[in-house]
Image (cartoon, grey):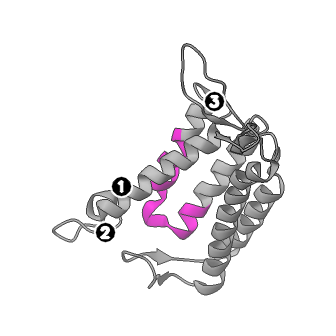
Amino acid sequence: MKTRKDKTVFRLCDSRIALCFPPLILAVNIMEAVTRDIEVGMTYRTIAQDATADVSVLLMGGPWNFMNAAAGILNIITITGWFGICLRKVTEKDKSKDMLWPDMLWFWIAAYDIWNFAYTYNCLPHHAWYCGLALLLAPTLCAFTVGKGAWLQHRAQTLALWCMFAQTFPGISGCGTIPGGLLL
C-alpha cells in the first residue's frame, strides 16, 4: 500500500493491469511447456538420449507430444477470470492475505494437473513422479480443502520451493546422481 501526494491510497491489487500478471505468467509458463512438447515430438522420433538434460535421459517423441501441446494451448485459451483476482481480507482468526482467484474452477485445475503430469512424463521422465505428481497434488489438495481459491498461489509456492531445493541439493533431489552412480 502506498500513499500518493494527494493523500489517496494506491494498492497494487486495485490496478487492472497488475491483475493480469498472474494469469499472464501462468499462460507463458504453459506455452513454454507446449514448445518443449513440440520440440520433443519433432526431435526424438525414436528412443534417444537427451543431450540437454542434467542427467542421462532417454526420450521418445510421438503424436502424444503434439496432442499434449494442443491440450496446453487449450489450457491457455480457457484461463478465465483475469480481472477477478483479489486479496483475502484479514480476519481475527487468520492474518494471511492470500491471493484468491475465485474464477479458477475445479475442473480447470484438474485438467491442468492432468496436462502438466503428461508433460512431465513425456518431456521430463526422470522427474515425473516426484516433480510432476507430488508438486501437482500439493497445491490441488490445498485448493480443494483449506485454501479454496488460492490454487495459483499454492502452485507457485510449491514450485518455487522445489526449484530452490533442486538447485541447492541436486544429488538428493534427483537432478543428478548419488555416490555409486545410482540415478535418483
Query: Which residues lie in the magenta part?
Result: 119-138
**Rendering quarter of residue 51:** bottom left
Alpha carbon distance from label 1 to label 3: 26 Å
* Above or below 138: residue 37: below
Q: Position of residue 115 (x, y in %)?
A: 67, 56
* Above or below 21: residue 54: below
* Above or below 84: residue 40: below
Identify the amino acid type marked 3: Phe
Q: For numbered disc 2, what is the local secondary structure?
A: loop
Taking the view exactly as shown, the residue that stands out farthest to the left is 180
Q: Residue placed at 42% from the left, 53% from the top?
A: 162
Identify the amino acid type marked 1: Phe
**Residue that label 1 marks:** 165
Alpha carbon distance from label 3 to label 2: 34 Å
Question: What quarter of the picture does the N terminus occupy?
Answer: top right
* Above or below 105: residue 172: below
**Residue that label 2 marks:** 176
- Residue 129 makes an appearance in the image: no
**Residue that label 3 marks:** 144
Earlier-in-chain disc, 1 versus 3:
3
Question: Circle 2: is it few (<14), some (14-19), or many (20+) Cα within 10 Å?
Answer: some
- Residue 135 magenta: yes
Q: Residue placed at 68% from the left, 43% from the top?
A: 110
